Structures are given as structure tokens and as C-alpha cells.
Image: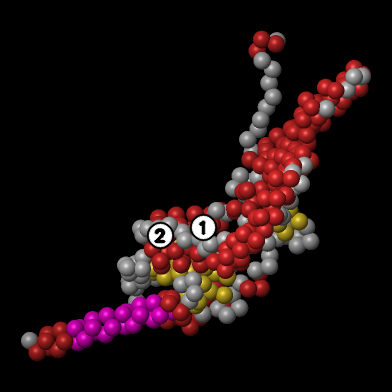
């Protein structure tokens, strides 16, 4: 009876000690999170040992870790700088949306030069890489859940889906920072108020660029090229103009084979071909009709048809090569 009482007391104090240790770890994580501007906790080998390898499972928290390498941030094909910023944006939004709750999911990053042992501990051999260490994760290399490489194209949306599907937590709306600050807004507003009387005088006298038809023509061509070249996709997704070949660093990749990614110059090439077709169509319908020589009209028309056919054929060839879906021409059944 006495031994049972002693064991019960020892177990009770062990439970209390474990609870105090867990609460201390959580308090330290929240303190590190509050010290970070974005809420992303910077880990090194010592912090990984303290928060991941030393505590027994199940841990009272989960860590989402972004693996980074400062020396590789200038490589456009990795996009580490951009991905790090988007990771911080999701982290700050998650923290702001759960300000009144305590989900105990912490966003962290690890840098290669500072924490090479941690990279080996997780088995990270390529970047970008993101690992989710759950509460019951024992082996960091085998049990951690890794974000797929294909999900880094639409990174912000994919990261939100990854978090919600693995942790069953809701990230909430993403709080994007304003494009311009309040100071910049005030400067622009003041400049507009000062400039508006002079602009009104120019408008009434018809001496502005908006009264020049060449400006409207150039603007229409620019908007047409802007729309058919996928420039909005390049800007919104912050896609690089080209990639460097990993096997041959001196070789540049301008056309990427695959449906999940489109490079900037790749879109510009297709937009250039589309713009040629559009300009030739405008030439035929608005200029060629005023040519009085029938022979010149025929030659110009045949030239326009040939170049337009070649341009459209190149776009179809690029689409077939990129997506793997072939577009075949056919003759109507009534023609044969």
C-alpha cells in the first residue's frame, strides 16, 4: 500500500513537470512569434533540438517549416525570395485571423548555412521545401508531411489548401498589404489637386494626348498584346521571364513544357504571334480596301493569309508541345 502511494505521488509530480515543460515550450514559441514582424519563427539547429527532437510525442503544437537558403535566393527558377514573402503573408494572416483563439500551429523557417544539421535531419536535398511537423510526428525525415513540388506554382493558394487539409484548421482570408502607403496616397492626392486646374484647361482646349488618335491606336495595340500574351498571369503569379537549366547553368529555358506553368517570354512569344494576326486583319479591313490596284490587293491579301496561317500554326504547335493535347484540322464530311 505504501509503495503504491509513493508511485502515485511520483507519477503525479511527473505529470505536473511534463505539463509545466509543455506550457513553457508553448510560451517560448509565442514569445518568438511575437518578436517576428510577420510571425514566422526563425529556427536554428539548437531550436530544432529544443522544440522538435527533445520533447516527447505527442507534442502540444505543430510546426510548419519553410526551408530557405540565402545564397540561392538570386536564382529565378527557385523563387525563394518570393516564396518566403508569400509564406510570411500566409503566416501573418493566419495569426491575425486566430488572434482570439490558440490553434498552436506555428510558422517557422530554417536557413541552410545556419542549420545544415537540421536540413540533414529532415532529409532536405532540394529547394523550395516545406514540411509540416505534426504533434505525433516522431521521425522528422519519415513522418513529416512535405508539400509537393507542383504546388509551388500557385503557392499562396496551395499553401492554404495544404494547411487546411493536413491540420483541419481554417486559415481564413489572406490580408494583402496595401499597394501604396498612406503617405504615398497623400502625396498623390496633393499632386492631383495641384495639377487638376491645369489639366482641366488643357482638356477644354483640346491640347492633351487624349485628343491624339495615334495615342488611342497605340493604346489599343498595347492592350491587345497585353491581353493575348498572358501578361496578367505573369504579373499576378510573379512568373519569371525565363529559367536557368539546372544541368547546364549557361543555358536558359524560355519555353517550359507542362500545363502548370507559363514563363513570361513564352507568353510574349505567343502574344507577338497573335498580335501579328490582329494587325494583318486590321490592315486588310481598314487599309487594303482603299487600294485601287486589284493585283496589289491580291498580293497583299495572299501575303496576309499566309503569314496569319503560319502564326496561328506556330501557336497551335506550341500548345500541342506544352500540354500534350493535339489539335487536328479536319475537312467537313460534305466536302468528300
**Was residue 12 drawn as part of the magenta stretch in this picture?**
yes
Where is mark 2, residue-wise? 171
Residue ID at (49%, 54%): 157
Q: Secondary structure at mark 1?
A: helix
Q: Is residue 62 above or below residue 308?
A: below
Residue ID at (87%, 20%): 298
**Was residue 11 drawn as part of the magenta stretch in this picture?**
yes
Q: Is residue 55 visible?
A: no
Q: Quadrant of residue 279?
A: top right
- Figure quadrant of the C terminus: top right
Q: Position of residue 255 (x, y in %)?
A: 71, 48
Q: Quadrant of residue 331?
A: top right
- Total number of numbered labels? 2
Chief secondary structure of the magenta portion: helix
Q: Position of residue 35 (x, y in %)?
A: 46, 79
> Relative to residue 167, is residue 14 drawn left or right?
left
- Figure quadrant of the N terminus: bottom left
- The numbered mark, 2 or 1, whose residue comes first in the sequence reads 1
Q: Position of residue 244 (x, y in %)?
A: 72, 59
Viewer-proximal residue among 191 and 149: 191
Q: Is residue 296 above or below residue 68?
A: above
Where is mark 1, residue-wise? 156
Q: Is residue 99 visible?
A: yes
Q: Position of residue 275 (x, y in %)?
A: 75, 38
> Relative to residue 282, is residue 147 drawn left or right?
left
Q: Secondary structure at mark 2?
A: loop
The CA distance from mark 2 to mark 1 is 11 Å
Residue ID at (41%, 67%): 95
Magenta segment: 10-32
Amino acid at each position: 500500500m505504501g509503495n503504491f502511494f509513493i508511485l502515485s505521488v511520483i507519477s503525479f509530480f511527473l505529470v505536473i513537470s511534463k505539463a509545466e515543460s509543455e506550457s513553457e515550450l508553448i510560451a517560448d514559441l509565442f514569445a518568438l512569434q511575437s518578436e517576428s514582424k510577420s510571425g514566422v519563427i526563425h529556427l536554428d539547429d539548437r531550436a530544432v533540438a529544443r522544440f522538435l527532437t527533445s520533447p516527447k510525442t505527442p507534442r502540444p503544437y505543430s510546426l510548419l517549416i519553410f526551408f530557405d537558403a540565402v545564397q540561392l535566393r538570386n536564382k529565378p527558377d527557385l523563387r525563394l525570395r518570393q516564396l518566403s514573402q508569400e509564406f510570411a503573408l500566409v503566416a501573418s494572416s493566419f495569426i491575425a485571423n486566430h488572434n482570439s483563439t490558440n490553434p498552436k500551429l506555428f510558422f517557422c523557417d530554417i536557413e541552410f548555412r545556419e542549420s545544415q544539421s537540421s536540413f540533414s535531419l529532415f532529409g532536405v536535398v532540394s529547394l523550395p521545401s516545406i514540411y509540416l511537423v505534426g504533434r505525433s510526428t516522431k521521425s522528422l525525415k519519415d513522418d513529416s508531411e512535405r508539400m509537393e513540388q507542383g504546388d509551388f506554382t500557385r503557392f499562396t493558394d496551395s499553401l492554404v489548401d495544404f494547411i487546411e487539409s493536413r491540420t483541419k484548421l481554417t486559415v481564413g482570408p489572406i490580408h494583402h498589404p496595401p499597394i501604396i502607403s498612406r503617405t504615398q496616397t497623400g502625396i498623390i492626392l496633393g499632386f492631383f489637386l495641384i495639377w487638376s486646374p491645369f489639366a482641366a484647361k488643357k482638356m477644354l482646349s483640346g491640347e492633351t494626348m487624349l485628343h491624339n488618335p495615334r495615342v488611342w491606336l497605340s493604346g489599343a495595340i498595347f492592350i491587345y498584346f497585353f491581353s493575348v500574351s498572358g501578361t496578367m498571369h505573369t504579373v499576378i503569379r510573379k512568373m519569371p521571364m525565363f529559367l536557368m537549366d539546372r544541368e547546364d547553368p549557361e543555358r536558359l529555358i524560355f519555353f517550359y513544357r507542362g500545363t502548370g506553368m507559363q514563363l513570361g517570354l513564352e507568353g510574349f512569344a505567343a502574344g507577338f504571334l497573335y498580335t501579328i494576326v490582329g494587325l494583318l486583319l486590321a490592315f486588310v479591313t481598314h487599309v487594303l480596301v482603299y487600294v485601287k490596284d486589284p493585283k496589289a490587293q491580291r498580293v497583299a491579301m495572299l501575303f496576309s493569309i499566309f503569314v496569319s496561317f503560319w502564326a496561328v500554326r506556330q501557336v497551335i504547335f506550341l500548345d500541342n508541345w506544352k500540354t500534350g493535347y493535339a489539335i487536328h484540322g479536319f475537312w467537313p464530311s460534305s466536302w468528300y
